[in-house]
């Protein structure tokens, strides 16, 4: 008799868990934080703010021998069920890529009208974040990877 009375509670908790599924920009909360990669004199830092108001803001800079050589600003925005990756790279026109795949620790954005890259992607594994860009270049598929490590955020 006592066991039977737990069924309503079990159903209530299962329903609450189903309602609590992550949606919108919250699906990319795993990206938040500071990430860095260094090889030789080149360092690339990327930082992402936590999700808020249907968006995440990111920025990156590439430094070579203490000289800033590239930077970009990114805003991730909810666009219905999809997420837009709105990027403004240094010296280039603003471009918007739209999510084509969002997993628990990965995301792929695509814009087939853009020359290069046509895809921007991230995959996290613990304190490692693999970012890559890819698309056709000179008749072949080219992929450039950025293997980041989590670092403490400065400030």
Image (cartoon, rainbow, N blue to C red):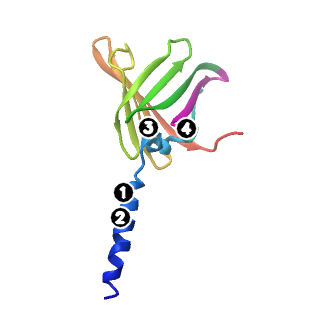
Per the model, the C-alpha gap separating discs 3 and 2 is 34 Å
| Stretch of the chain drawn in magenta | 54-67
Q: Provide the secondary structure element on which disc 1 rests.
A: helix
In this rendered view, identify the residue nearer to me: 144 or 86. 86
Q: Main secondary structure of the magenta part?
A: strand
Tell me whether circle 2 and circle 4 mark residues in contact (CB < 8 Å): no
In this view, the residue farthest toward the bottom is 1
- Which quadrant of the figure has residue 20? bottom left
Label 3 sits on residue: 130
The disc placed on residue 68 is none
* Residue pointed to by mark 2: 14
| Relative height, residue 119 to residue 151 (above, below) | above
Q: Is mark 2 in CB contact (under 8 Å) with mark 1? A: yes
Q: Which residue is mark 1?
A: 18
Rounded to the nearest angstrom, the CA distance separating label 4 from label 3 is 26 Å
Image quadrant assignment for residue 2: bottom left
Can you say which quadrant of the picture contains the C terminus?
top right
Which residue is the extreme one toward the right?
Answer: 155
């Amino acid at each position: 008799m006592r066991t039977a009375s737990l069924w309503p509670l079990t159903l209530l908790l299962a329903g609450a868990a189903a309602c609590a599924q992550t949606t919108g920009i919250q699906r990319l909360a795993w990206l938040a934080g500071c990430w860095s990669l260094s090889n030789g004199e080149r360092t690339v830092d990327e930082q992402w703010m936590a999700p808020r108001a249907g968006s995440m803001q990111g920025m990156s800079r590439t430094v070579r021998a203490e000289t800033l050589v590239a930077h970009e600003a990114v805003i991730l925005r909810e666009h219905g069920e999809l997420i837009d990756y709105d990027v403004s790279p240094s010296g280039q026109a603003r471009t918007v890529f739209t999510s084509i795949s969002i997993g628990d620790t990965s995301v792929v954005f695509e814009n087939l009208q853009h020359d290069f890259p046509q895809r921007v992607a991230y995959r996290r594994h613990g304190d490692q974040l693999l970012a890559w860009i890819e698309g056709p270049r000179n008749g072949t598929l080219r992929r450039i990877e950025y293997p980041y490590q989590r670092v403490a955020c400065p400030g």
